[in-house]
Image (cartoon, grey):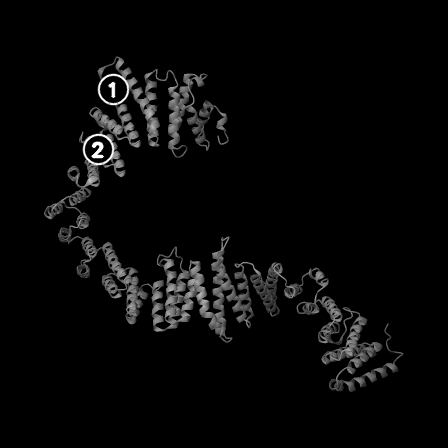
Amino acid sequence: MDNVDFRSMDFKEVIEKLITSEDSPGIPEAIDRLFMDVENINRESMAEIQDAQVEEMAVNLWNWAVTKRVGLVITVDDKAKLRHVACRLMSMCEGSAASEEALRRQILMNMKTGKGWVDVGNPVVADEFFQATMAGLEQLYNNIMQKSSTESHLTTQKIAVERDVFKVLSYQAESAIAQDNFQRASACVLRCKDMLMRLPKMIRYLHILCYNFGVETYLQNKFEECAFWLSQSYDVGKIENSSVEPEMLAKALRLLATAYLDWDDREYYDKALHAINLANKEYLNPAGLLLKMKIILNGETTNEELLEAVMDMLYLAMPLDFYLNIVKLLMDHERESIGFYFLKIVCERFKSSENIGKALLFHIDILFQRKEELLAKDKIEEIIIGHQTGRQLTVQALGYLHDILWEKAAKSFELQNYADALIWYCYSLRVYECDQRDLNLAKLKRNIASCYLRLKQVDKAKEALAEAEQYDPANVFTQFYSFKIAIIDGNSERALQAITTLDNLLASEDPEKNELLPDRGASIMLLSLAAKFALENGQQTAAEKALQYLAKYSQDLQQALTSLKCLFRLAYPKVSEMPESEEKMQEMDRLLTCLNTALLKLTQCFRGTALPSDSMVNEAHWFRKIAWNLAVQSAKDLVRMREFFMLSYKISQFCPCDEVVLTSQKTCLLMASSLDLQQGRRASTPFEQTMLLNRALEQIHKCREVWNLLKETGNFSNDPCETLLLLYEFEVKVKQNDPLLDSFLEPVWEQPDIESKTLETIASLAMETPAYYPSIALKALKMALLLHKKKESFDVFKYSKCMHSLIKLLVPDGVPSAELCPLEEVWGYFEDALSFINQNEAYPEVEILMLMVKSWNTGIYMYGSGMCVSAEKWCGLGLRFLARLGPSLKGNYETQMNILYSQLVGALEQNKGSCFREE
């Protein structure tokens, strides 16, 4: 039935489909379709269907509705609609009432349908069916009277019809009440009442119906109608003594008395009193007696009459609570003299009862309400002495006594009357001296300690708190007061210990599972109070610790951020003046933790916020600057410096991306990458180095993204960022032996504006352990030399440094690398250097010395290898460099080198024939 389109079906098809369904989402749709269509259908429109078929459809539809449980398949409204449709179909059949059986069935269906509409709140439609029912009953009655039958059979059938008429009248009364038609409802009920002598079994039903009408109208403040219905309920119940229980009659009368009292307690006083007297006569219970007392108190009753009335109640053997309620009524109506007198008698009467404590506490409560504190204290003394000497209170009474005393103490404390608060707490303590079974004793001791602290009696406060700690050490309030006492004593170590214990309690306990942990919000507020108290007493270190934990646990994000800002304002000046030491490192670690907390809180602030407020953005700016400043302060600690720079970067992401913020982000990422590379060079294990290099590479990529955004905001042609990113990334790739290194360098070689210094750095990194890329180094140095030569303002010093690196690469340890570069090309670089030396007097002498040594050693190496001609050539080159040295250095080498060179030339002349001839 899920996919059936009922709009394409005719009326009959819908019914047939519906009654074959068990449970389907389409049922409500089908019911609504039938209900809407049935009013537009008449017998002529269904002429092709015989009466028997129509009747069968109606009966089947009715039975299907009756068998379906409301709520599981159809609603009460749906059930009423189905009955409505079935009744309409049945009325279309010309012979539907031809037989007595058919007529009775139609009467039943109309009656049930009308009642269904009343129950779902549609009394107007219901009335149509009730009228049809009455017409059917009249027809049935006439049919019965026309038939010949025995007298007894006729009487039985007439009573059955009358019973149905009674039901319809009661239903019509319900409909009238729903339509706020009191006249019609009362007329229907009075007709029912007249029928009760013939239908005694309906007495209870009509009694309850009238009572329910009374309750409904009472709730609507229709007291006149309410009085009528409740009076009728009582009258109907009294028709036959055994039909309605006395308790039910008394219940109706009590509500009647209440209605009179609420209607007008003066005009209807006598009626209210008469009703309650009748109720108590029918069935005496505490509710009736209390109501009677309330009515009497609303009248002009003298104290003597009132006293007589309450004293009469003492003979009724009611429970204690009843008499205490009488006292309360007397007090509420300002009959205090009688109330206190009666209470005294009640206490005397119940003095041996285990519940006497309840009466005594009630007495104390009333005295407090009347501001009779001295009398209340006397009564408390009496109770405590009795409790200590064997007349012990029940557990419930003890709890109530403590509640009274603590409430008084709390009010005095709030009014800053700490001495008075202490008196009330001490009363409670005297009770606990006999019963130390729960943790409230620890709470009491803490409250007493708090009072002593306010009264500047620190020693007594310590004593009370020490006892509280014995009973409940794992309590945040115990630690808070311990912290306060330590601050007052100037004991920083003890204060820090207390605040750390408080932190551990908050961190380790699950607030949803731990019943001993107080409200978490209140516990966190203690940290705020602790910080404030420490600052007021000049204990900065303890205050900082409290602020740190407050920021950590506070769910109020603004409170957390404010706490952190306060902490940094206290700690930063102190840290900036500290010498490098273990203490400074610990303090830096603490501030690093606090900044991470700030990052977490800011993340929570900005999460899901499309347009953050200016104040939130300002908070982010403040913390990113603090992180930056702390990074600068950590110049000698690379690890912490890197952490602070990264925190500054992360926090800056909550700020609008203007030029200032982007510049800050770029610098933070560059510094973090540089620091990771430095740490990577010093790494003790390959794993550590790989981790640091990968992290640096990730930061380099982020920095490049930021740099690209920054370049869109202005001209940054003088900014070295691009070069640094290139060098940092090259260092990572070269040390990780990246197989795509050549591809990475291709665009670098082609850059038209690349600087010689950048190329020299690439060369250096290419040969820095564990990297070994001599071909890359050679290419970079050759390009760098070429750039030096092309410069308009030739820098001899920079050229010499570049040449130094090239020669060192090509001639390591005096042995030329023929695989890396042909010997002739190496010779050319030496010649170029010599040419520049000859043209520039400012060429560094130490570099000339290096060239001399390298060329001379190369010659010696070749001589040892049997290449005499090349040896003489290289040694001769060395002498040419020697000639460019200053007198001092030249004197150190000249004699020995000339001697050796002469020997080399001589040996070469003597062995011309046997010496190896180079190509």
Label 1: element kind? helix
Relative to 291, is 743 above or below? below
Q: Which mark is residue 280?
A: none
Count every numbered label the image shows and give the total.
2
Comparing labels 2 and 1, the label whose residue is closer to the camera: 2
Q: Is residue 211 left or right of residue 694?
A: left
Residue type at numbered disc 1? Lys
Q: Nearer the viewer, residue 604 or 357?
A: 604
Q: Position of residue 488 (x, y in %)?
A: 34, 71
Q: Residue furthest front?
A: 714
Neighbours of disc 2 within 10 Å: few (<14), some (14-19), many (20+): some
Hey, what amino acid is under mark 2? Phe
Which is more N-terminal, label 1 or label 2?
A: 1
Residue 413, located in which quarter of the rendered image?
Answer: bottom left
Residue 585 rendering spot, x and y as whole percentages: 50, 71
Point out the image quarter for the C terminus: bottom right
Res 68 visible? no
Callout 1 environment at 10 Å: few (<14), some (14 to 19), or many (20+)? Answer: some
Name the element at disc 2: helix
Residue with the mark numbered 2: 228
Q: Which residue is mark 1?
A: 158
Q: Say which of 463 and 421 sits in front.
A: 421
Q: Is residue 286 visible?
A: yes
Residue drawn at x 29%, y 15% is 143
| Nearest the eye: 762 or 359 | 762
Give x and y (percent) for residue 323.
Answer: 17, 48
Per the model, the C-alpha gap separating discs 2 and 1 is 31 Å
The residue shown at (31%, 67%) is 465
* Residue 886 figure quarter: bottom right
